[in-house]
Image (cartoon, rainbow, N blue to C red):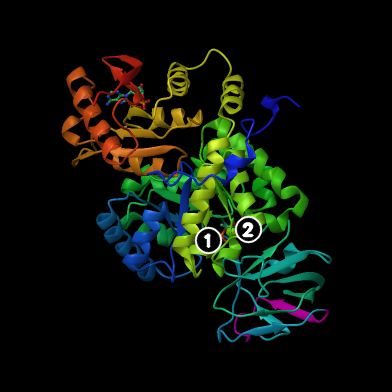
Amino acid sequence: MHSHHLLLEEPIRMASILEPSKPSFFPAMTKIVGTLGPRSRSVETISSCLIAGMSVARFDFSWGDTEFHQETLENLKLAIKSTKKLCAVMLDTGGPELQVVNKTERPISLEAETLVVLTPNQEKEATPNLLPINFSGLSKAVKTGDTIFIGQYLFTGSETTSVWLEVNEVIGEDVVCLIKNSATLSGSLFTLHVSQIRIDLPTLTDKDKEVISTWGARNSIDFLSLSYTRHAEDIRHAREYLSKLGDLNQTQIFAKIENFEGLTHFDEILQEADGIILSRGNLGIDLPPEKVFLFQKAAVYKCNMAGKPAVVTRVVDSMTDNLRPTRAEATDVANAVLDGSDAILLGAETLRGLYPVDTISIVGKICAEAEKVFNQDLYFKKTVKYVGEPMSHLESIASSAVRAAIKVKASVIICFTSSGRAARLIAKYRPTMPVISVVIPRLKTDQLRWTFTGAFEARQSLIVRGLFPMLADPRHSADSTSATNESILKIALDHGKASGIVKSHDRVVVCQKVGDDSVVKIIELED
Ligand SMILES: Nc1ncnc2c1ncn2[C@@H]1O[C@H](COP(=O)(O)OP(=O)(O)O)[C@@H](O)[C@H]1O
Ligand SMILES: C=C(OP(=O)(O)O)C(=O)O
Ligand SMILES: [K+]
Ligand SMILES: [Mg+2]
C-alpha cells in the first residue's frame, strides 16, 4: 500500500512514541464540549475545565430546571472572567425523548427472563413489573420482537444500571416486554430508546420552545443542539423559531443525529444545519455495533467536505468513575480526530463524573497527539478534488493560505473576518497550525438601536478545529483601510506572542482584504 493511502504520515519511529510531548499553549486544535452539571458547576471546577481546554459548555435541558442551569451559567461567566478563556454556550433540547417516570425515585431491580409492562399511566408507581413512561403512543409504534433500551440519564453503556428489553406483546396502550439482562435502575432520570422506530412527537417540543424563549434568549445562546433531528424540516422549523427571538437569529443550529431516521436524511439535514453532532449514545442503540464506525467515517467526511463542524459524543464513558480511559476509549478518541472531527462532546464524564477536569485534560492530550500524525496532505488533496473547479474566489484564497502556511512552516495563520466565513473556510482545509480568527465588529441597526456584530461569530468558532478567535476593538470597525489593517494585525500578533504561539523570527500567514482585494501574505517576524 502506498503511503498516500494511509491515514498517518509515514514513517513513525517506534522510539519517538516514547518521547514525552512538549507542553504547548493550546491543549489541542480539536475542541472539547463539556456538559455542565452537579459535578461541574462551581466557579472553581469550571475554571479548571476552561484551563484544561473546554471551549464550549453544553447545558442539557433533558434534565434540570432553568434556575439550576442559570446558576451554573453565572458561575461559568465568572470563570471566564477570572481565567480569561473564552467559552461558548450550547443549549441542548430535550426533544422527543422517552423517559421512565419514577416518582418515588426508589431503585427498581429488574430481573432477567421476567416480564415488565411499560404503561403510559403516569399515576402508577414504578415497580420491577411495571414502568410508567411519558409517552402514550409507544404501543402503536412498536411490534413484537422490537428492542428497547432503558438507561440512566447520560447512560454510559458500561454500567449495571442499563437494561435491554424485547417487546413480547402489546395490550391496549401497554407494552409487555421480556427483560434480557438483570439490572437495577437507580437515579432520578431514565431514558428509553426503542431501536429503529418512528416516534410521533415534534422535534422541537413546547417545553423546548419555552426554554429557548426564556433561558436561551436571556443568555444569547451561541449554539442550539437540536436533539433527535430527523429531517431537514426540523432545522428549518427551529431556525424560523429562533429568528423571532431577537439576538437568537444569530444562534447556530447543530443537528443531533441520534437515530436511524436522522441517518437516513443525513444529506438534507447537513445542508440546512450549521453543524452536526454525531450522537453515538443513542445511535449506538439503533445501529448494529459493527456499523457504528462506518456511520462515523461517512458522516464526518460529509461534514468536512461541506466545511461544517462535526462533533463526536460518548468517548470516555469509563472516566465517569475512573481516572484513566480504557484502551479502546483512548484509541477511539484518536480515531475520531484522524477521521476529521472538529470537536469531542463529553456527557456523563463532566456532568456527574468524578474527574471532569482530568477527563478534559486527557482527551485533549490524545487529540493533540493524533493531530500530529493526521495526514494533512492527503486530506488537503481530497478536499480540493471534492470542491472541484472553478473554485470560488474565497475558497481558493483560503486553501492557498493553508498551503502557503504549511510550505513556509508558519507558526500561525491570522485571518481577518466579520462574518466568520473566511476563517471557517481556512479551517476546512485543516491547517496544521492554529488559526487566529480576528473578528472585526460591524455596526448594524434594527431601526431602533445600533449594535456591533462579532461576539457570536467569535464564540461560534470555538467549536471549529484549529480556530482560536479574537474579537477586535469596535473602534477598528470594518473599513479595511491599510492603516486599520496594520494596527489590528499588530494587536493580533501581540496576542499570539502573549499566548505563546508566535515567537520572534516566526513566519506568519495573514489573510485579509486590502481595499477590495483579498490577499494572502507571508510575514517574517523580527525580534
Ligand atoms: N475587516 C476586515 N479587514 C480586512 N480584511 C477582511 C475584513 N473582513 C474580512 N476580511 C477579508 O475579506 C475576505 C472575505 O472574508 P469574509 O469572512 O467572507 O468576509 P466577511 O466577514 O465580510 O463576510 C477574506 O480575505 C478576509 O480575510
Ligand atoms: C449526546 C447524546 O445525547 P444526550 O446526551 O443528549 O442523550 C448521545 O446520544 O450521544
Ligand atoms: K438532550
Ligand atoms: Mg442522545
- Residue identifier under label 1: 347
**Callout 2: CB less than 8 Å from ligand 2:** yes
Residue at image coords 26%, 32%: 492
Residue 42 vertical position relative to residue 327 in the rendered view, above or below: below
Expressed as whole percent of the image width and height from the top left, the position of residue 466 reads 44, 37
User: Measured along the vertical axis of the image, is residue 522 above or below residue 291?
Assistant: above
Which quarter of the image is occupied by the N terminus? top right
Q: Residue 392 location, x and y as percent?
A: 48, 17
Residue type beneath disc 1: Gly
Distance, label 1 to label 2, CA atoms, is 10 Å
Location of ligand 2 given as a quarter of the image: bottom right
Helix, strand or loop at label 1? It is loop
Is 350 placed left or right of 249 in the picture? Answer: right
Residue, x 60% and y 65% (percent of image)?
318
* Image: magenta residue range: 113-126
Q: Is most of the magenta stretch helix, strand or loop?
A: loop
Decide which of 201, 290 is in the foreground and name it.
290
Question: Is residue 375 positioned above or below 263 on the image?
Answer: above
